Amino acid sequence: MKRSRLPRFDFYLDEMLAAMNRVKKYTQGLTFEEYVSNDLIRDAVIRNFEIIGESVRKVPFSFQKKNRRMPWNHMVSLRNVIAHEFFDVDDDIIWAIIQTDLDANIEELQNILG
């Protein structure tokens, strides 16, 4: 019997980076007030955070453990809030993540991907 290969997960890391870059692009130059008043941008940003969290779930824990600088658990937790408590997504928290964490997460993920 032929041994099956482990599934590749680099696709999910690439998708995470693409989603992070889309969030950055969609919100660049906006104020918080402009963000919350534009349903199209807000929905797109929230959807991309959901994609990020869902992608993390496909990355093996052993890999996450080796790359502790990424907030893997926080990304999954945010995805869970978005997916299951979608009426209660806190715009202040989303905006704070964009303003304080997004650039560092993009940089760290780029370093991981080489």
Image: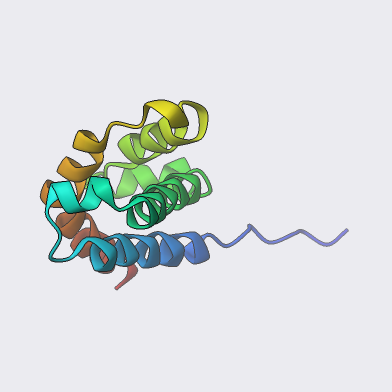
Q: Is residue 32 left or right of residue 61?
A: left
Residue drawn at the location 28% of the way across and 61% of the way down: 109
User: Residue 22, how many percent across, how many down?
Assistant: 33, 66
The relative height of residue 98 versus residue 82 in the rendered view (above or below) is below
The relative height of residue 12 versus residue 74 in the rendered view (above or below) is below
Residue drawn at the location 39% of the way across and 56% of the way down: 40
Residue drawn at the location 30% of the way across and 53% of the way down: 38
Residue 87 versus residue 20: which sits nearer the camera?
87
The relative height of residue 10 versus residue 50 in the rendered view (above or below) is below
Q: Quadrant of the C terminus?
A: bottom left
User: Residue 29, how many percent across, how many down?
Assistant: 12, 65
> Residue 101, can we see it?
no
User: Residue 97, how many percent across, how many down?
Assistant: 20, 44
The extreme bottom residue here reads 114
User: Residue 33, how many percent across, how many down?
Assistant: 15, 47
Residue 58 versus residue 103: which sits nearer the camera?
103
- Which quadrant holds residue 88? top left
